[in-house]
Image (spheres, grey):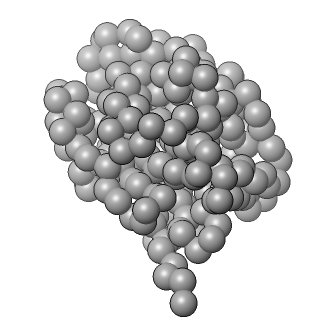
């Protein structure tokens, strides 16, 4: 009987001051299965863990898919280096589960390596609409003023409205939209088929929102 693993990536946005990139560099990929790894920040957030950001890696026979790219190009480079330590297969796809700054601002690092950025159509629209606002004033987020100096907002180039499947060779990854605004108008579930698991962000789980959802109010779901 195949073992089912459900790995949940959740987010509550905590503004932190005194960000330590060295602490981020020390974080390691956690092995979930032979084909699935997670990159998980310190729970509850801390000065050395920007926004408790998380990411996932799915390795197929032919290609690698990355789920979210953290908070900046610098953090994206750290994540890229960690992936290269565990596989030499090409990173062909990046999936943004939603547009929030701690999930999509490392996109340009992977795009420059030739990866295709995928996301819900609302994710692309939001990144384009909020591009200038998101990176113009890092200090307002409690970050150093040069935090996004090397970051280039890079929206998804391939989008979908309901669902999409990505074939990595031996493993198919399903991208699913619930049809309802949850953590954002374009939040999606990344389901790793072949019973390997799922990455879920901000929906269908117990989480206390702290006013950082698109709806702008606090609730428990």
Farthest-out residue, right? 161
Residue 26 seen in this snapshot: yes
Q: For the point 39% across and 39% down, which residue is it?
A: 83
Left or right of 175? Residue 110 is left
Q: For the point 34% across and 31% down, which residue is it?
A: 81
Left or right of 123? Residue 11 is left
Left or right of 12? Residue 198 is right
Residue 217 seen in this snapshot: no
Q: For the point 71% across and 50% down, which residue is it?
A: 166
Q: For the point 32% across and 39% down, which residue is it?
A: 85
Measured as percent of width and height from the top left, residue 80 is found at: 40, 32
Measured as percent of width and height from the top left, residue 179 is found at: 78, 58
**For the N terminus, which image quadrant?**
bottom right
Answer with the quarter of the image where residue 141 lies: top left
Image mark count = 0
Measured as percent of width and height from the top left, residue 94 is found at: 59, 37
Answer with the quarter of the image where residue 149 lies: top left
Measured as percent of width and height from the top left, residue 91 is found at: 54, 35
Residue 3 vertical placement versus 55 (above, below): below
Residue 213 vertical placement versus 158 (above, below): below
């Amino acid at each position: 009987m195949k073992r089912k693993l459900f790995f949940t990536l959740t987010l509550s946005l905590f503004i932190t001051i005194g960000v330590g990139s060295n602490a981020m560099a020390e974080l390691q990929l956690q092995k979930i299965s032979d084909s699935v790894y997670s990159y998980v920040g310190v729970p509850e957030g801390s000065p050395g863990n920007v926004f408790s950001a998380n990411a996932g890696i799915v390795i197929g026979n032919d290609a690698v898919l990355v789920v979210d790219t953290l908070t900046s190009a610098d953090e994206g480079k750290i994540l890229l280096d960690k992936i290269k330590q565990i596989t030499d297969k090409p990173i062909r796809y990046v999936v943004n589960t939603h547009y929030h700054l701690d999930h999509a601002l490392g996109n340009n690092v992977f795009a420059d390596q030739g990866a295709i950025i995928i996301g819900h159509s609302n994710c692309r629209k939001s990144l384009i609409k909020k591009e200038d606002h998101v990176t113009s004033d890092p200090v307002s987020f409690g970050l150093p003023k040069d935090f996004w100096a090397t970051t280039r907002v890079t929206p998804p180039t391939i989008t979908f409205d309901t669902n999409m499947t990505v074939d990595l060779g031996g493993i198919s990854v399903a991208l699913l939209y619930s049809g309802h605004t949850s953590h954002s108008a374009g939040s999606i579930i990344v389901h790793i088929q072949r019973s390997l698991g799922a990455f879920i962000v901000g929906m269908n789980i117990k989480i206390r929102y702290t006013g950082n959802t698109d709806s702008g109010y606090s609730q428990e779901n």
